[in-house]
Amino acid sequence: MRRRAADYRRPVRRRLSCWIWSLLGIFSIVGFVLFVVHHHHDHEDHVEQPVSERESRNEQVVHERMNLTQEMLSVNSYARQIAEQTTLAKAYIIIAKEHNNLHLAWELSTKIRSCQLLLSKAAMRDEPISLDEAEPNIRSLSSLILKAQDAHYDIATTMMTMKSHIQALEERANAASVQSMMFGQLTAESLPKNLHCLEMKLMADWLTKKSLQDFADERRNSPRLVDNNLYHFCIFSDNLLAVSVVINSTVANADHPKQLVFHIVTDSIHYGVMLAWFLNNDFKGSTVEVQNIDNFTWLNSSYSPAVKQLMSTDSRKYYFDGSQDTGVEPKFRNPKYIYLLNHLRFYIPEIYPQLEKIVFLDDDVVVQKDLTPLFSLDLHGNVNGAVETCLEAFHRYYKYLNFSNPLISSKFDPQACGWAFGMNVFDLIAWRKASVTSRYHYWIEQNADRTIWKLGTLPPGLLAFYGMTEPLDRRWHVLGLGYDVNVDNRLIESAAVIHFNGNMKPWLKLRINRYRPLWERYVNQTHPHLQDCATH
């Protein structure tokens, strides 16, 4: 077959085909690019959405696990937002009332009560506040706060108002603290009904049973009372049950109780009560002496500046008239500090002139070990053997004494260790030689205006026995069971003497129940009078 000439071929069709293929290629490329871009965006959306959902879900789980306290500490919690708005709203209530905008103050108060109710419900059910619960409260309270701000309650006014409000709250807190301290002291000073009942029954015994009085006369001049081969202990108190526990615990833990002699001094009111109790009870052969402080005729205002000050009109007004000098803390006015029995510890050599060594015990201690090794301790010529308390917080001289007084700052080291009254071994020979009682009298006279120390017998003791105190092993005397709920059990178990110093005495309802069994085990529960008075 003959081919056509070149002039008769169809070049137009070939050009059209090329254009079509070119356009198809371009469309394909564009379509691919669009597909890739679109797929990339879809992939990002697909990835971001689960991540955000997971984060939201995790946040929700964490949120649900938080209790209300944790919510309040969380920056993003609804409870914290509501609480912070409520605090600000309270400030605006005060400002609104001051500007006589009572309607706004009422609106704020109503919304605050609603928010407080929501917080209270959340706390009771122990679940977090949800967004649905929080949102209407947050919105409405925010609206009221903005309304208050629009009323020209600027930030400076708010700050000043809040500052005065805080000061008022601090004053109320201080007043409540003072009141609480006063109530605590009243409770500590009061005698429980059952103990009052016991004393009344014993007083009746003393007055009606002449045999008791005769027996007391027979034992009054016992040679054991002045025998320096025996172990002598002294206790000055008007609390019968407390003294009984001290003696019972000492005897129970002694290796040789028959070698113990206890010297009790009380007041005239409790003298017959003490005799009736201790003459009618057995203490494993140990000797118990009871003396009446009113029989110490030598202890008068002409000999003792302490007695002179304690009996003065100014002292009685200071301790008993609460309307005077309101700047003085109530604890400094406690009348127990003018009770002469508390000051007898500085007159031990005069009370027991024939004794050479004695152990002083407070009536709020319990003895857990044999104390007779105390009498063989070497005091290295010192008068007083005591446990130092500077290992505990702030028990150094500068905390008890006024070192701005040159008489104090020139003679004493402010960082010197304090020590404890309550279990002390006294070398009475060294005491008389050093004239410690005269030193005590000197410092009592210097403190007539109460500028060197405010209260108690420990500060004058720190001064009188300065440089004459031998530190004892801490295990001899552990303190704090009358105010500290966290005394280490290991310390208590290893202690020879535990001390319920503080207002929370074990015989009171105001006590630390954790320690009460340590004291109660030495109460003679079998005594018929105690059983009769148990229900009072």
Image (cartoon, rainbow, N blue to C red):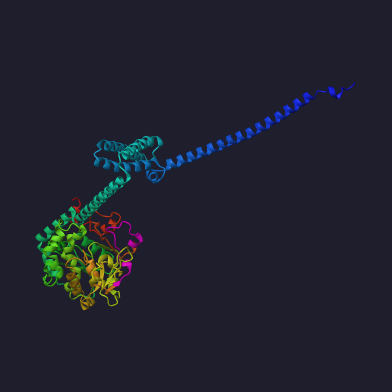
Coordinates of residue 255 in the picture (x, y in percent): 29, 68
Assess whether residue 488 is covered by the magenta stretch: yes
Quadrant in the picture for the N terminus: top right
Q: Is residue 175 visible?
A: yes
Please name whichever residue, 342 or 135, is drawn nearer the observer in this view of the structure.
135
Tell me residue 124's x, y (percent): 34, 40
In the rendered view, would you say 495 is above or below 377?
above
Q: How many marks?
A: 0
Question: Which contiguous range is marked in magenta?
Answer: 470-492
Q: Hey, which residue is sitting farthest right in the picture? A: 1
Splitting the image into 4 quarters, where does residue 384 fall? bottom left
Q: Main secondary structure of the magenta part?
A: loop
Name the residue: 84% across, 22% down.
Answer: 8
Between residue 460 and residue 32, name the one nearer to us: 32
Name the residue at the bottom extreme.
433
Establish if 146 lies above or below 520.
above
The answer to whether residue 224 shows anywhere in this view is: no
Task: Examine the structure image and report whether residue 77 is included in the region drawn in magenta.
Answer: no
In depth, the one of 496 and 441 nearer the eye is 441
Please tell me in which quadrant of the rendered image residue 350 appears.
bottom left
From the viewer's perspective, is 266 left or right of 468? left
Counting from the top left corner in percent of width and height, residue 494 is at 34, 64
Question: Is residue 488 positioned above or below 467 on the image?
Answer: above
Seen in the image, is 275 located left or right of residue 132? left
Camera-side residue of 419 and 221 = 419
Q: Residue furthest top?
A: 1
